[in-house]
Amino acid sequence: MTNARRYAPATERNREPILAILRDALPASGTILEVASGTGEHAIHFAAALPGLVWQPSDPDPSALASIRAWAEGAKLPNLRPPLLLDAAAPRWPVPKADAILCINMLHISPWEATIGLMQGAARLLDEGAPLFLYGPYRRAGIPTAPSNEAFDESLKTRDPRWGLRDLDTVVALAGEHGLALDRVVEMPANNLSLLLRRRADGLAPAQ
């Protein structure tokens, strides 16, 4: 099954900077739902580094799920659950609750409906104060977009016109509509950002 493993070169570059933030942002125990786990490399790395947490990877792509299973088979981590088929845009997710949600590099390579679904899902699954962690490239008002990100945005839209870099303020505003408040934004390597949002006490899940 190891031949199903996929590799994302960026993972080796960003996993330690992301982990440094997760160590501070995530709870000491509980279940972490990773939405759009991709190759599974992040799930393996974070589950190994944070043994007190139960890691639940997921993805809507069957080939990604096969890759996650293959990585997990080699790692044999007791706190890593089998991956779930989960489409962020779906009105129902196969997970009833989570103590935190993680989503790396999804928003710009998926339709906007997936981002809406992510916020709705976070509103349903998270308790007050629980974090939603996002990582990836964004556009920011008043700050020029790096040329590399501009080229990346053009490439994404060529592949699918529904894709592309999201506006940070728009994402934060959408989160606010679903009871999630911005805790902090952290500059990351390669012109990426980490966003930490938390479930507000007065946040209500959207009616379904």
Image (tube, rainbow, N blue to C red):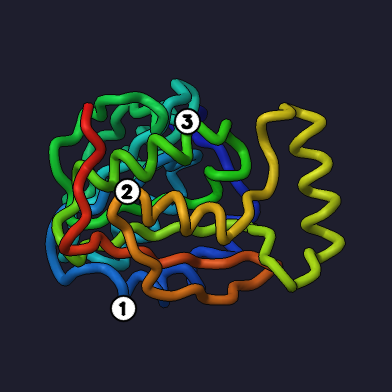
Locate residue 58, reporting x and y percent: 35, 36
Using residue 124 as the reference point, say whether residue 139 is left or right of it.
right
Front of the two marks 3 and 2: 2
- Residue at the disc numbered 3: 64
Between the C-alphas of marks 2 and 1, the distance is: 24 Å
Looking at the rendering, which quadrant does residue 45 occupy?
Answer: bottom left
Crowding at dot 2, Cα within 10 Å, few <14 / some 14-19 / many 20+, comes out as many
Looking at the rendering, which quadrant does residue 169 occupy?
Answer: bottom right
- Residue at the disc numbered 1: 24
Residue ID at (58%, 60%):
168
Q: Are marks 1 and 3 in contact (CB under 8 Å)?
A: no
Element type where label 1 sits in the image: helix
Between the C-alphas of marks 1 and 3, the distance is: 28 Å
- Residue at the disc numbered 2: 178
Q: Are marks 3 and 2 in contact (CB under 8 Å)?
A: no
Locate residue 29, reporting x and y percent: 13, 65
Residue ID at (55%, 44%):
107
Locate residue 187, reporting x and y percent: 59, 76
Q: Do the residues labelled 2 and 1 touch (CB within 8 Å)?
A: no
- The reply to whether residue 126 is in sight is yes
Element type where label 2 sits in the image: loop
Which amino acid type corresponds to the residue marked 2 in the rendered image? His
